Amino acid sequence: MAKIKLTAKVDSEILVVGLGLANKKLQIESGAAQLDSASLLATLNAMGATAKADEVIKLPGKATKLVVFTGLGEIKSSYDPEVLRRAAGAAARDLNGNKSATFSLPHKSVVELAAIAEGAALGAYTFVEFLGSSKQEQKAPLELITLISKFSDTAQAKTAIKRAEIIAEQTYLVRDLINTPPSHLTPDSFSQKMKKLATKYGVKAEIINDVTLKKSGYGGIIGVGQGSANPPRLFHVSYSPAKAKKRYAFVGKGITFDTGGLALKPANGMEAMKSDMSGAAAVIAAVFAIAQLKLPIAVDGWAPLAENMVSDNATRPSDVITIYGGKTVEVLNPDAEGRLVLADALIKAAEVGKRAGGLDGIIDVATLTGAQVVALGTRTSAVMTNNEEFSNQFLHAAQLAGEAFWPMPLPVELRASLDSPIADIANIGDRMGGMLVAGLFLKEFIDPQTPWLHLDIAGPAYNEKQPHGYTTVGGTGISLRSLVQLAELASSQA
């Protein structure tokens, strides 16, 4: 992962600056760095530069080998941190194969500086584990990111840079897990890897294996995972600082590969189903980040892990399973499996939270429904809730973090579609409004007195198209930054 440092002057062969538009004319936004703007602007105009977001142009420099221009759009007296985050990320993505670069983008506050640092670090990511050595070298991301800032000597700036490194480190972890092929990432290997990292970050961890899951009545996790040769797991991490101001539980869907089970998915696009554990990766890494930041917020992270496969042992359409805690579910569609493993984990998370004195909130994160993508596209995630105040707190945190979430309702009239004649509830209901129906299913396993959020990240979790801003192709790490930001807000407001 790239190291970030602060400086007062250019100290590498590559200088990254901003390019914007003022009155439809190009203008270089180079922060504290001094450039021969007139000659550079003449060249940029001749090249047809637009200064739009995601535009990156490289030119030979005089004092440096390269000057890299990254689009900022319209010139502003003060830039939205997310504009800076994306511009820095786009430039960093374009600099694969280089060792270091100095970023001199306009900023008037430590908040804006932090966004630049975070964007550059997030953009400097590639997944090279399965490439040959020559291709690894060619695609190697930046190792050192230097930021020119007038705040470079302040304690606030140094703290912000350290936070950006932690956010990038844990986002890399989420992306790596999502991008790892299912031949190398199973419920057990996920759990074993995360348990080792938990020790590194000073977080308690436990792995509940398939034998214990079955004996203890985790019918959702067992029912989904019983068709696979790779048995399911429930992975749990716990960060409990002294005098914690609040206590949260994060629960993430962890389907390490989803064939659809006996409701087999079409072959076209199934390869992306290695990303169906994005929620699990995000919540566990968020707990790690909160621990690294030493926030006075207690958090339990839960990852119900299973591989949804086709076999003679797989759950059949119309089977009835018993969720942890006793509620029965008629499984009409084995491809609506994420809600089944989440139900088990939500009940368990609430049980453990109650023993610890109660939860201030429980949040589940899941690549849950194709309906989410239909409704909100591939860059905006959904939020559903039983508590508007908690939802508003999260949406504020997401806005600060630069992640796009949108509130969605849980219409009571859709609940009847989940009724089953032979079980307490069915796992699917009306097709229209399927994202909302899935949320209503999960709501059945939540104590109404506990503030709860359901985050459906189905589209934004995995980028199958072109890279943009600090987002590379593959796993994105969506929701991690918002979860951490929520904990930070809680620690400052409590």
Image (tube, grey):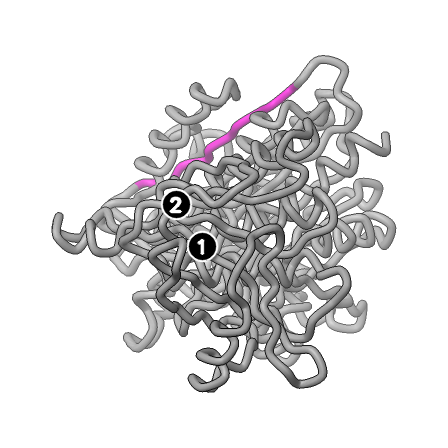
Q: Nearer the viewer, residue 301 or 314?
A: 301
Q: Give, as a three-letter code, the residue at label 1.
A: Leu
- Tell me if residue 432 comes above or below residue 18 in the rendering: below
Q: Give residue 96's position: percent from left, percent from top.
A: 32, 56
- Residue 106 coordinates in the image, percent (x, y): 64, 56
Secondary structure type for disc 1: strand
**From the viewer's perspective, is 196 left or right of 295?**
left
Q: Are marks 2 and 1 in contact (CB under 8 Å)?
A: yes
Q: Is residue 312 left or right of residue 480?
A: left
Q: Dot 2, crowdedness within 10 Å: few (<14), some or many (≥20)?
A: some
Q: Nearer the viewer, residue 122 or 42?
A: 42
Count how many numbered circles sit on residues in the image. 2
Residue underneath mark 1: 15
Q: Main secondary structure of the magenta part?
A: strand
**In this view of the protein, can residue 221 be seen by the observer?**
no
Where disc 2 sits, the SS reads loop
Q: Quadrant of residue 374?
A: bottom right
Is 235 covered by the magenta stretch?
A: yes
Q: Quadrant of the C terminus?
A: top right
Tag of residue 12: 2
Q: At 42% from the left edge and 68% from the top edge, which residue is drawn?
A: 467
Instruction: Report crowding for label 1: few under 14, some 14 to 19, many 20 or more residues within 10 A (C-alpha).
Output: many
Residues drawn in magenta: 231-240
The span from disc 2 to disc 1 (Cα, nearest Å) is 7 Å
When asked about the image quadrant of residue 344, the answer is top right
Which residue lies at the image location 38% right of the left edge and 65% below the top edge?
Answer: 260
Residue 313 lies left or right of residue 479; in this view the side is left
Residue under the point 74% across and 67% down? 76
Q: Residue furthest top?
A: 242
The amino acid type, in three-letter code, at marker 2 is: Ser
